[in-house]
Image (cartoon, helix red, strand yellow):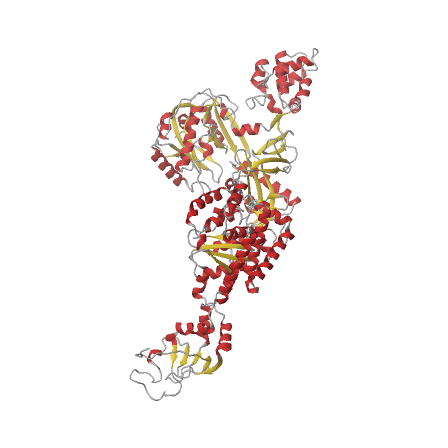
Amino acid sequence: MKTIEFLRSVLGDGGCYCVFAANAATDKRVQKFYDSLEAVAKAADHFDADGFDVYFGLGSLREAGSRKKENVASLKSLFLDLDCGPSKEYPDQQQAVQALRKFVGELNLPKPMLINSGRGVHVYWPLTKPAPLVEWLTVAERLKKVCAERGLLADPAVTADAARILRPPNTHNYKGDPPLPVERIGVTEPVPVELSAFMQSLGAELKPVNTQIDLGPDALQEALAANKESVFKSIVSKTLNGRGCAQLKNVWENQNTISEPLWRAGLSIAKFCKDATVAAVKISEQHQGYDHDEMQRKLSEIKGPYTCQKFDELNPNVCGECPFKGKIKSPITLGQKIKEASGPVEIKAKSMLGGPVEKTFSIPVFPRPYFRGETGGVYLRTVNKEGDPEEIVVYQNDLYVTRRLRDAELGEVIAFCLHLPRDGVREFTVPLTSVTSRDEFRKNMSMHGVAVFGIKPLEALMAYTQRWIEELQATNTADEAHRQFGWVDDDIMEEFVLGDKLITGNDIRYNPPSSKTGGMLEAFIERGEKDAIVSNLEFYNRPDWEMHQFIIGMSYGTVLMPFTGINSLGVHLVSQTGFGKTTTSKAALSIWGDPELLILQKNDTQNSRMNRGELYHNLLLVSDEMTNLNTLQMSEYAYALSGGRQKNRLAQSGNTERARGKPWRLLALSSANTSAWDILSREKAEPKAEMQRLLELKVPQKLVDPRLKRHADELLKAIERNYGWLAVEYVQWVINNRENAEALVLDAQRRIDAAAGLASENRFWSAGCATVIAGLIIAKQLGHVNYDVKAVFDWLVAELRERKAFVDDVGSSVQETLSNYIAEHYNNVLMIDSNEDLRGAGENENGLDDLVRPEAVPRGQLVARYEPDTNKLFLLPKPLKEWSADHQLNYTSLTNELRDKLGAKRTKMRITKGTKLNMPAVWVLELTFKMDIVDEGSED
């Protein structure tokens, strides 16, 4: 297809046309306007031959000089741009065309015309006749929406852009080496389509529109215009140096001879400049009949700055040689500059993380040569080749770097703050490694809502970011990115991290997300009302509900654990349905944030549970319905909690250890319908160590009240709508009263130990329960709860006494342990009398030595020898040691008890003595052990 044929199919006759050409090698750009399609085709050929990338405007223009949307009269095609390439929406043109065919087929659209742009694919649907701009926009916007809905990855910035330029066929794409041809794909000629019919295929009707509507500037342009001001002095300076407006020069130099309308035109420019008062006098005072009051009267009548066209009408034959002809609408734009914000600015806005309350954000002074516009936005001030100041829009909204951070996994990261006019303020971080890579920078910024199109604007934004980093590196040290919530330092307890808040004794500062905390910031956004949270907690202020109140107290007490020197205490609730374990747990978590996000569920893994423990650091760790754990998993849970650290793992990047956080110091609450202590006892002969780390509380049946279900359901809804408002007040009290808080914990621990008879082995119970009592005392002082803390204390002491007595009785005696071992290995014990040795006597009818009992012939591994006539038992050490390890028994302790309580001694003997097996003597444990062996056929 010839270029002229293509242009005729997609452009209407009449009007003015634009050709834009760019030569990357010489950094030269040309934009020209033509009044015929033939001239456009010739210009395309000419520029292409000279090595330029050639583009044509899709819209027919009203007049030359501008291809902006406001100057577009009509369009004769609908179009799409499908980007192709390794980092683009489609890997190659084939896949892009396949997606397009599917899209066209599903909507029964006419076949489009396709142009290979060198890398991507341009798609055109020629129209039967040129469409007025407003009608065309209606259909183009619909097309853009349908593409998004149907998953066709067309560039959304192109589809409805009336001022768009694209490549004509029969030219070249010079952005590669060698240059790639821009050419037609396929040979089928497209059938022009009616605009209304196309709209119907898109599932909508084309309603009549008023083609006389003034589209006016878009929202972005209005926002940028709000930052602009004009300075008359700058206009005059340029004018007198030959780079300004000849009409204004005439007004300035010939004040005595110019006509009154022309003088009024000059005043119209002066009036709307920043220095209006001085400017109006300067272009009036040299008139011999100058009258100040008359000038003021004239000024009051002027409604706006006169246009270039108006000046030309008043004084013809002056504007013809103006270098700005067709480029500006009024001479006032020659003095335009951006109004600069003076100093740091504080504004109130909502955080895009959510929450109903506005925060105060301090927008700093940007590093030079960048500056903030008076109403927002990032601008760069430079000097052009004529020596005039030039101001460039880097980004239309406020965007700035707040700090540098060190992240243990990502290295140095940069914290940004983005202000959006409708959405609020978004705070986010980007790794420094991404800031220095164009593709990674674009992806990261786009992910957080910073929309930048085109390589030059992207590079301008990268340069701006680099300038911020240089400024901060010269003036500030990088902060540590907090990878855990809770106390920044458990020993000092002066700063507390909660979501995006860094809480101090009298302030709340912004805490940028780290690679670990970023995904959980949303959980700590306040919602609802503080009084509603207090009301929810008051629901548990009932007689005999001390266990519920204890759970609420755990949420307060958990942040006091650093005072105890113990890493953690796990509390496990056992009850049937009806106690409200989940609802009470969520009420406790609502003190800090969104309970639905903070609570761990039944299907969460052990690794994820410990990961949360590290992340929460000092916050209550709640695991709901933790029922399906086996003995090993429950034991690991108890030990991991008390150890305060996750197990070590290798990082994904190589043979290096994964970065771990500081040890946690917290309270952990788990709940289930089964007993954790029972699970531990299934395969462990001595589960006491875990029991001391995991305090189990059984809910009395009297607390399981089905009649409260309706109230509990309503309470749960209220809890999920109100949370997070009590945390800051509580933490700040602890910071400002640290010594008093520590004294409360230590006093509570002393009184609990004395009343419940706790000893050193009960140190986990003692420490954890003390923080709960102290936490409730503080919460009551703050008005968060109104519980009878003494009643909770008395209930707790009674529970601890009972649980202590239970644990003290747990564990097998050495006699029982040995019996269990023999019972499990009965078929592996050689039973033989010792009083005679008949090894030479031959075999009986069963083929056995007469002294070996037929039912006691060892099968498989031999673990022991038992002599019924002497009650002597000889134990082989190795099998006993393996069995002890399997049952998590200490082998050394077991053998010591066998020695001390059963008289075991270490001796050497042939374990198969008296049989035909001639094995050498080995070391064994010899002891007296009575086993009742019943003869087969006896009455017993």
Counting from the top left corner in percent of width and height, residue 815 is at 45, 74
| Residue 194 visible to an observer of this rendering | no
> Is the N terminus in the top left, top right, bottom left or bottom right quadrant?
top left
Counting from the top left corner in percent of width and height, residue 49 is at 48, 32
Q: Is residue 58 above or below residue 472?
A: above
Question: Viewer-proximal residue, 684 or 405?
Answer: 684
Counting from the top left corner in percent of width and height, residue 586 is at 49, 48
Q: Quadrant of residue 701?
A: bottom left
Q: Quadrant of residue 937?
A: bottom left
| Residue 234 visible to an observer of this rendering | yes
Decide if residue 474 is on the left or right side of residue 657.
Answer: right
Decide if residue 146 is on the left or right side of residue 293.
Answer: left
Q: Is residue 481 above or below residue 279?
A: below
> Is the C terminus in the top left, top right, bottom left or bottom right quadrant?
bottom left
Decide if residue 850 is on the left or right side of residue 60.
Answer: left
Q: Is residue 311 above or below residue 428?
A: above
Q: Is residue 940 above or below residue 181?
A: below
Q: Quadrant of residue 279?
A: top right
